[in-house]
Image (cartoon, rainbow, N blue to C red):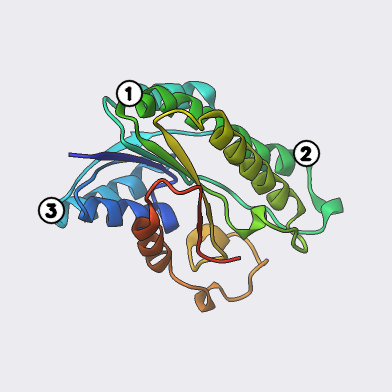
Amino acid sequence: MSTIAITGAGSGLGRALALKYAKNGYKAFLLGRDDTKLHLVQSEISNAGGQAEVILCDVQEPASVSIAFQQIGELDVFINNAAIGIFGPVEDYSIQDIDKTLNTNVRGTMLCIQSALPLIRESQGRILTIISTAGLRGKVHESIYCASKFAVKGFTESLQQEWANDPIDITAVYMGGMNTPFWDNSTHVEDPSGLKGPEIVAEQIFSQDDRRNEIVIDR
């Protein structure tokens, strides 16, 4: 059975991806900070006849990331999905806002890929980084979030060059906003219900997950 690990798997796109891949024969390792949410996703997968394991992981903490991936024996696909967004005028960001965004979105991505890499090399597998259109262009009141996603884009493209002759691959994934809990503590998007559901995006990602350099859902 093929295996997949997904960060931020307790809700939103991470949950939708876990359900989609599990439905198609993958054993899913569900990584995240909220034990309750992760176990609910695990139950959904189990009830549908799939297999999943819950692994607590805070991508901001190097030890947590290292320990999480040590619990995975074999890994074919890693989806780096965990991210946060803090929005507003640039002068309103606190040091804590900046640190939390960069530590989660940028450093967390780097730590997770470093920890997943030995497993991915062993299986000659692949990695997907969820970047969003915020990694393609700047947006009003999204300066710190866009900066973090531009960094992940650069990191991903650099690894594509670094691994050009290796039997492993990394794919950059770009999509617009979705109707997920990502917006729960923000007024940046007034009515997320008008956005597409994460299930639609997960379906598109799964159908295009063939080791290509980019999956572009939206620009």
User: Mark 2, mark 1: which one is toward the viewer?
Assistant: 1
Question: Residue under circle 3?
Answer: 49
Residue 203, given in percent of the width and then of the height, sits at 35, 63
Q: Is residue 155 above or below residue 181?
A: above
Q: Which numbered disc flags the more N-terminal residue, 2 or 1?
A: 2
Contact? badges 3 and 2 (CB < 8 Å): no
Q: Residue 68 lies in what quarter of the image?
A: top left
Q: Residue at x 43, y 70 (%)?
A: 197
Query: Amino acid under label 1?
Result: Glu
Q: Is residue 18 above or below residue 67?
A: below
Q: Is residue 184 something that shows in the picture?
A: no
Q: Residue at x 30, y 38 (%)?
A: 54
Along the viewing direction, whichever of 159 and 150 lies nearer the viewer: 159
Q: Residue at x 39, y 63 (%)?
A: 204
Image quadrant for the N terminus? top left
Question: Residue under circle 2?
Answer: 95
Extreme-right residue of the structure: 91
Q: Is residue 168 above or below residue 138?
A: above
Query: Amino acid under label 3?
Result: Gly
Extreme-left residue of the structure: 49
Q: Is residue 137 something that shows in the picture?
A: yes
Along the viewing direction, whichever of 62 and 1 lies nearer the viewer: 1
Q: Which numbered disc flags the more N-terminal residue, 1 or 3?
A: 3
Along the viewing direction, whichever of 148 and 34 lies nearer the viewer: 148
Question: Residue under circle 1?
Answer: 122
Q: Is residue 50 left or right of residue 179?
A: left
Query: Amino acid under label 2?
Result: Ile
